[in-house]
Amino acid sequence: MNFLRRFMAGRNGTDQLSLAILIVSIILNVVSGMIRIAIISSIVYSLAAAILIIGIFRILSRNIERRRAENAVFMRHWNKVRNYVRRQADKLRQSKTFRFFKCPACKNNLRVPKGKGKIYVTCPRCGERFIKKT
């Protein structure tokens, strides 16, 4: 165990981007096993191997500042995706009791209780009023 600590000293190690790369490599490797066409399977397998090599390179890299910058860019994009998925999951959970509309003026998402018939909806952001059936 001491050998591994000494070996990894001054190296990047695992971060979120490295883990994502390794997971993509594993998924592609599994997909390549499911494909029955040999040429396509070998291409996907080669792609998975190349991605795995990139992931291991990132983990063992000594250029920590560059790897941190790459990880920061990845996390900025990943957080957008994760927040979008969370918002959609929240909408799905609330869909039994609420309806969701977009304001025609500012495109703000609005939540209105279901079962109220036709109502005036007032956008809290821009003050636009419009009629919607809930």
Image (cartoon, grey):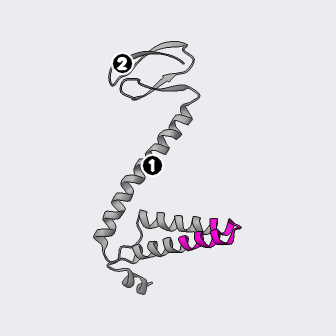
Reply above or below: 45 against 105.
below
Residue for point 33% across, 19% down = 127
| Residue 38 place in picture, x, y as percent | 68, 72
Instruction: Quarter of the image for the N terminus: give it.
Output: bottom left
Residue for point 56% across, 36% down = 92
| Residue 26 place in picture, x, y as percent | 57, 68
Q: Residue furthest bottom?
A: 3
Residue 39: say if magenta: yes
Q: Secondary structure at mark 1?
A: helix
Left or right of 31? Residue 94 is: left
Quarter of the image for residue 63 reads bottom left
- Decide: few, some or many residues near mark 2? Use Cα within 10 Å; few <14, some 14-19, many ≥20: some
Name the main secondary structure of what is drawn in magenta.
Answer: helix
Residue for point 68% across, 66% down = 35
Residue identifier under label 2: 128
Residue identifier under label 1: 81
Reply above or below: 133 against 14.
above
- Cα distance, mark 1 to mark 2? 29 Å
Q: Residue furthest right?
A: 36
Residue 66: say if magenta: no
- Which segment is the magenta one? 31-48
Please, what is the three-letter code of the amino acid marked with disc 1?
A: Val
Reply above or below: 47 against 111.
below
Q: Residue furthest front?
A: 39
Instruction: Quarter of the image for the C terminus: give it.
Output: top right
Reply above or below: 111 against 67.
above
| Residue 17 place in picture, x, y as percent | 42, 64
Quarter of the image for residue 28 reads bottom right
